[in-house]
Image (cartoon, helix red, strand yellow):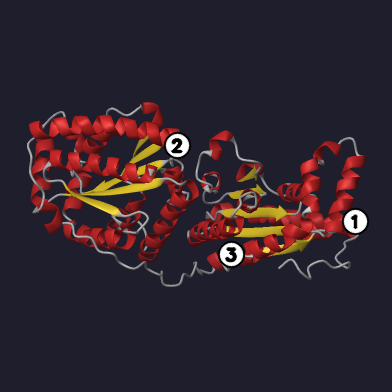
Amino acid sequence: MLKNVLNPKNCIDKKVFEKKIVSIQERLGAIQRALREAHIPVIIVMEGWDAAGITHSTKEVIESLDPRGFTLNTIMQPTDDERVRPFMWRFWIRTPPKGRIALFARSWYSRAISAEMQRTSWTKSLEGGIISINNFEQQLADDGTIIIKFFLHIDKVEQKHRFEEREKNPLSAWLVTPALWNLHNAYDLSFPVIDHFIEETNTAFAPWHVIDATDQNFAVLEIYATLIKTLEKTLNDRANGKTIRHNEPLLPKKHPLKRKTANRTQDISCVKKECIPIVDHLQEEMLRTQALLYKRKIPLIILYEGWDAAGKGGNITRISRHMNPRGYDVIPVIAPDATEQSHHYFWRFINYFPKAGHIAIFDRSWYGRVLVERVEGYCTECEWKRAYREINDMEADFIYSTGGGILKFWLEISKEEQLKRFNQRKSDPLKQHKITEDDWRNREKWDQYEVAIDEMLARTNTKIAPWTVIGSDDKWTARVKSIEAVTSYCKKLLE
């Protein structure tokens, strides 16, 4: 895509530029207000060669915008906290809510290419980065985010000229470092890599716009023209009732799991007094396991899903009781608040993804998309069908990019046992806070949840992140099996 872009005729006289720019900026300002009213999120990516004018072009764009409605993200080398997170984490948390614009002066592209080319097997890693980025952008675009990506292109001769001009100026000389000259010397080597990266991430949902940036005035006007054309079309489509048209979601292959027979009839019932010493021993082992994960900087996600009153809280309590509290977090998931609803549904969960060596325990999770949101009609059929593949991709990306693990539990109980526990909670003053009207209402839709659960388990039971189903009619048996599963999984992870 970088070839045949540069043209000596791509030049705008300064007077012509100044005459055009005022009305163009006013137009983009009006578009920003319309986007806010329509609750449409926008991501603008500015990429390009060093000295191609990323800062200048970004500055020109934001001059036309209301600062209360956009966020500028200048992406530099990752901070210490960002280094110990999944690669895409720091970009996910910067995605805009509905009605706002997020500008990225450099982005996941620069960081992916920079990070991967430093590795010995960078070619293979680069392909993995392309997959992760395309998944990330498609998930946002499918959710309604408009993604506009610019690559500012200059040739090697022009780059050298700009470096030399900056070195002559005392106010800008500090910007030209030996590292930049090294990158300049590697221009010819980098060109095919960057060109390939752009080609492979030039998608219908997030296309690239390669701009000849030899003349900065020309580049700025081209950027404005593209922004205005893209955003006005989006607004007109929405005003005319045209919604985002999605192809029928490609559903992952099913890998069914037995929930009832295999996990109830084969369970060996044991009384509380027999289980307590087993749990105590496993808790001590869990502490040692936690220390090894921390030492080797391996992050771990443990998530619990299950029927209401299936014992998720009790299992989490037993797993974490003897663990070092500085090395884990328990994330209780409730209905999303207004801020969370204004973002992609992954956003509020990815915010809590663990650092290297830490453990995040989710009491319910992103699987709500294909359970409660599906059954209760909080999302469309297309959205919950699309979520199966989105979830599988997201979990695989976490594991591959961090070297960590995800352990997923489904706690299964019978309808009769659930009713028994509901009544116990209702009559016990110390447990009444655990039972709500929503629990009773969800119980009335038991059959609908049965269908949703079976499909969820079958379509997201992947080789890299499989489900563990635990029969939980006997609470203490379930707790023993849960901790055993965690310690066993961690041993394999450490190996």
Type of the residue with mark 2: Arg
How crowded pointer 1 is (Cα within 10 Å; few <14, some 14-19, many 20+) is rated as: few
Q: Which residue is mark 2?
A: 296
The numbered dot on residue 234 is 3
Seen in the picture, residue 119 relative to 477 is either above or below; the reply is below
The alpha-carbon separation of the residues under discs 3 and 2 comes to 48 Å
Do the CB atoms of the residues marked 3 and 2 lie less than 8 Å apart?
no
Which residue is at 39% across, 34% downward?
292
Type of the residue with mark 1: Lys
Would residue 238 be found to the left or right of residue 224 on screen?
left
Would residue 468 be found to the left or right of residue 419 on screen?
right
Q: Quadrant of the N terminus?
A: bottom right
Observer able to see residue 385:
yes
Q: Quadrant of the C terminus?
A: top left
Q: Within the image, what quadrant is residue 255 found in?
A: bottom left
Type of the residue with mark 3: Thr
Q: Position of residue 45 (x, y in %)?
A: 65, 54
Q: Which residue is mark 1?
A: 14
Which residue is at 36% across, 50% downward?
366
Q: Relative to the observer, which residue lies in front, 435 or 193?
A: 193
